[in-house]
Amino acid sequence: MSSKFDVVVIGGGPAGYVAAIRAAQNGLATACIDAWRTAAGELSLGGTCLNAGCIPSKALLESSEIYHRACHELGAHGIDAGEVRLDLARMQARKAAIVARLCGGIQGLFRANAVTALAGHGALLPGNKVRFTPHQGEARLLEADHVILATGSQPIELPSLPFDGERIVDSAGALELDAVPHRLGVIGAGVIGLELGSVWRRLGAEVTVLEALDQFLPMADAQIAREAERQLRRQGLDIHLGARVQSGERSAGGVRLRYEDRQGSHELEVDRVVVAVGRRPHTAGLLDPLSGVVTDARGCIEVDAHCRTSAANVWAIGDVVRGPMLAHKGSEEGVMVADLIAGRYGHVNYAVIPSVIYTTPEIAWVGRSEAELVADGVAFKAGTFNFAASGRALAMDQAAGIVKVLADAASDELLGVHVCGPMAGELIAEAVVAMEFQGTAEDLQRTIHAHPTLAEAVHEAALAADRRAIHAINR
């Protein structure tokens, strides 16, 4: 096996494996090092996203939603399903099969594009050299014209609640529970906490969410966040804002948490705890002190607008650099860097990266929020439309939520689109495309949307921005 490559990618997640495939498509001899392994010890490409994050969580979200609807909502459709029983082992097996299929698919893509897959750990040395340490065997030295660092991120551990893999778990552990806990504590009301809390609530757990911030989903538009909070509380998530966990200890019944809020100190006894307070860049053992790569106070590798590091011909992408920790953001950075290395045009428009939370209803947005526009003194107009007036949403029995469109008051250019409702993660794509081409609210208004579809809600919200909505009262 050759030890000289045009490109060596360290990390096989959505940023790294995409960069490796695009580099190979550009005619560059490419190797990708990744440490993820299956239970059998084989390489499992895909990083956290495919192995223990995006994909398995969406599988459980889908399964738990079907279970919940079968238990509580089919009657409204005239369907009597009789007794509904949960087989969690089969549900987990389905999730594992999806993960295995997708991870195996990346292996196939690597073979088809002649990417060399290396199972083990990589470390950047001076002079664009990489020390590759396989899971078994001796370390060896790889040389590369370019090195791409894509080692992703890892869960943040609270000093007062160290992970034990049994009662106190991280997001990956929360996806592998073999029984539905009677009482589940979730620390953190961000994307991960809300998604995982939703899964286990639907399956029957009493879920208490403790969020240290006083505001729910501060990264989302406030109107959308309020609607999402209202819907999630209705589903039984017991959400406590401004609740700062002080300590936690294992007890005879599970875990005893102590937290403080405006009302004072409290104790909460739960069977298991999911700590979902965020993630940090994973750079342990990655950088030789003389590599020339600089990290910031948060541990992120410092890069320029095109993901170049401070070391010549060394690039960094994905969760390990600045910006939102989103798989699709990392993938696009991987494409950009691989194209730049090959002498092609490469660019990522960071202003139009969509965000999605896969609860029910889903929450999605792109661009700026109303509060951000107000803070910057930008004159804008806003239009909203409720899914309660959507024929398709009513037919689906998923009529909760709203669409909100924000456009520049003078130019009409779209500044932000925010959705809380069914299939929001799919609906937001239309807004992303429109904003990528500097589209206006009028562009959305004059685009024909099929009837009856959920996408009509986006159309009506755009019309509402000019007080011209057809299926809502304009105010």
Image (tube, helix red, strand yellow):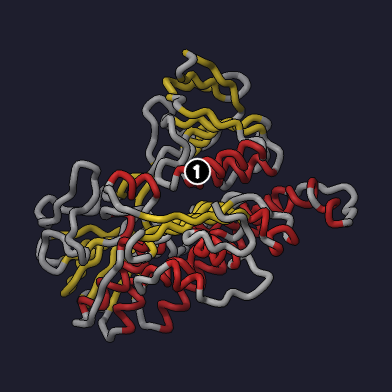
Residue at image coords 32%, 61%: 351
Where residue 111 sits in the image (x, y, percent)? Answer: 42, 80
Residue at image coords 56%, 20%: 268
From the viewer's side, name the closer residue of 355 and 389. Answer: 389
Residue 36 visible in the picture: no
Q: Quick check: 178 above or below 355?
A: above
Residue at image coords 88%, 53%: 81
Where residue 359 sits in the image (x, y, percent)? Answer: 58, 49
From the viewer's side, name the closer residue of 385 and 395. Answer: 385
Residue 465 visible in the picture: yes
Three-letter amino acid code at the position of disc 1: Ala
Residue 382, image quadrant: bottom left
* Left or right: 330, with 216 as reference point: left
The residue wearing badge 1 is 225
Residue at image coords 39%, 71%: 439
Q: Quick check: 332 above or below 172?
A: below
As helix, strand or loop, the secondary structure at mark 1 comes to: helix
**Total labels drawn:** 1
Label 1 CA crowd tier, 10 Å (few <14, some 14–19, many 20+): many
Residue 336, image quadrant: bottom left
* Left or right: 169, with 4 as reference point: right
From the viewer's side, name the closer residue of 262 and 260. Answer: 262
* Left or right: 71, with 290 as reference point: right
Q: Residue furthest bottom?
A: 27
Where residue 176 sits in the image (x, y, percent)? Answer: 58, 46
From the viewer's side, name the closer residue of 188 and 461. Answer: 461
